[in-house]
Image (cartoon, rainbow, N blue to C red):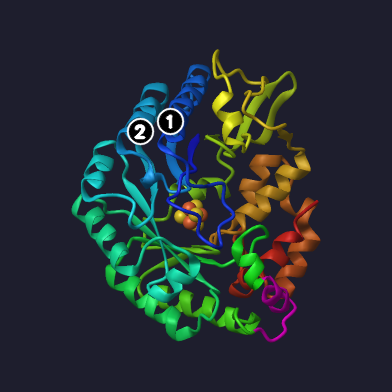
Amino acid sequence: MELYIHIPFCVRKCLYCDFLSGAYDKDVRDRYTNKICEEIEYYGRGMKDASLSSVYIGGGTPSWLEVSSMDRILETVYDSFRVEDDAEITLECNPGTAVKDAFKNYRDMGINRLSIGLQSANDDELKLLGRIHDFNQFLRTYEYAREAGFFDISVDIMTGLPYQDKRKLYYTLMKVGQLKPEHVSAYSLMIEEGTPFYDTYNFDSVKQQAGMPTEMLPNEDQNYGLTKLTEQFLEEHGYLKYEISNFAKEGFEGKHNTGYWKRVPYLGVGIGAASFLKRKTDVGTEEIRTKNISDMEMYLKTSFEGTYEEGVNSSAWEEPDILTRKDAMAEFMYLGLRMTEGITRDEFEDAFHVTIESIYGPVIKNAVADGLMTMSGGRIALTETGMDVSNRVLAGFLL
Ligand code: SF4
């Protein structure tokens, strides 16, 4: 099983951000730390046989939480669960939020992977995004991490930014490439409702999606060019694309996210955290997807007394979705096909006891004929063209 811990604290909100995060005072941060520890203990008491293959501390900005609080949370994880010897333990970190000594402390806590949010090496772009740091602050953070002994670092960058052209993106890629992180995530900017970016750029984004000329955001063709530049640059610099937006040096693919795409069960703790769990019923095993409540005050008032029991909902959960067999098959396909290695026929058959052809024969046949998918030796994967239009191809697997 995997564990996700949500730390929703940020110094201030970035202008494009619609994640569950915000600037909370120290009193809330302390109460939240207590509550999240209670929640971890509650599950630990009930999941005696579970062992954790990965722990991902995401946010928000987990590196903005006091080091002593982070230490308490991880101690609680170790006391409550068996953590596998080779478990990947990742902390998301934003430049300008952790002092040098913190990284040494993170290592001592067992954290062995960092995911650092850079987004751009151009200071004007960082300013436009409302990030709290400049590129030099990122460099210092990166240096502290390396000095403290982190040898598995992921750097996040963004494409499709307002006014971004190939020259600007190339500069970011070049600066990141020089540092040789083990992993790079490259996501395209999405203009989300309710953010300041929505007010400024939504008009342009609608035109972008309709394939019309835009003034501020890159148009569809330009966006495609930016994505291809990223892929080409990273591949030439020794990174393998192993998922639609993720690139890694060999052996450094993120275990935690790969688990999501392979449908490994995960438990999420903290506000808004999602879980995917399997539980035994009288007639077999059922799969559920659920999410914690998103309201901070409600979460802080939640009681985690007692012990988690399969079949009894946690008091922090919103109503869980019980997956039907069709839901599970569709997820298997559209999550698995996000990975460049794709999925195999045997895996499908092991999971569902029917052949993949009996469910998806025509969809696969058409996608192969259109050059969007390959099927060879029992392995099914998207082609490069299929990856470029993955939303459309993957939607074909919904049942
Ligand atoms: S640091 Fe990340 S989570 Fe926090 S406001 Fe910025 S984008 Fe959102």
In the image shown, does 350 or 124 lie closer to the viewer? 124
SS for callout 1: helix
| Residue 64, placed above or below residue 374 | above
Region rendered in magenta: 202-214
The three-letter amino acid code for the residue at tag 1 is Thr
Q: CA distance from mark 2 to mark 1?
A: 6 Å
Could you tell me if the residues under marks 2 and 1 are in contact, i.e. CB atoms within 8 Å?
yes
Q: Position of residue 192 (x, y in %)?
A: 64, 61
| Residue 52, placed above or below residue 196 | above
Q: Is residue 212 magenta?
A: yes
Please indicate whether residue 120 sits to the left or right of residue 286 in the image: left
SS for callout 2: helix
Q: Position of residue 161 (x, y in %)?
A: 53, 74
Q: Which residue is mark 1?
A: 33
The three-letter amino acid code for the residue at tag 2 is Ser
| Residue 22, placed above or below residue 214 | above
Label the magenta part by its dominant secondary structure.
helix
Residue 124, by quadrant, is bottom left
Residue 69 is tagged as 2
Please indicate whether residue 152 sits to the left or right of residue 396 in the image: left
In the image shown, does 274 or 378 lie closer to the viewer? 274
Please rate how many residues cluster around mark 1, counting C-alpha atoms within 10 Å: few if below 14, some from 14 to 19, many from 20: many
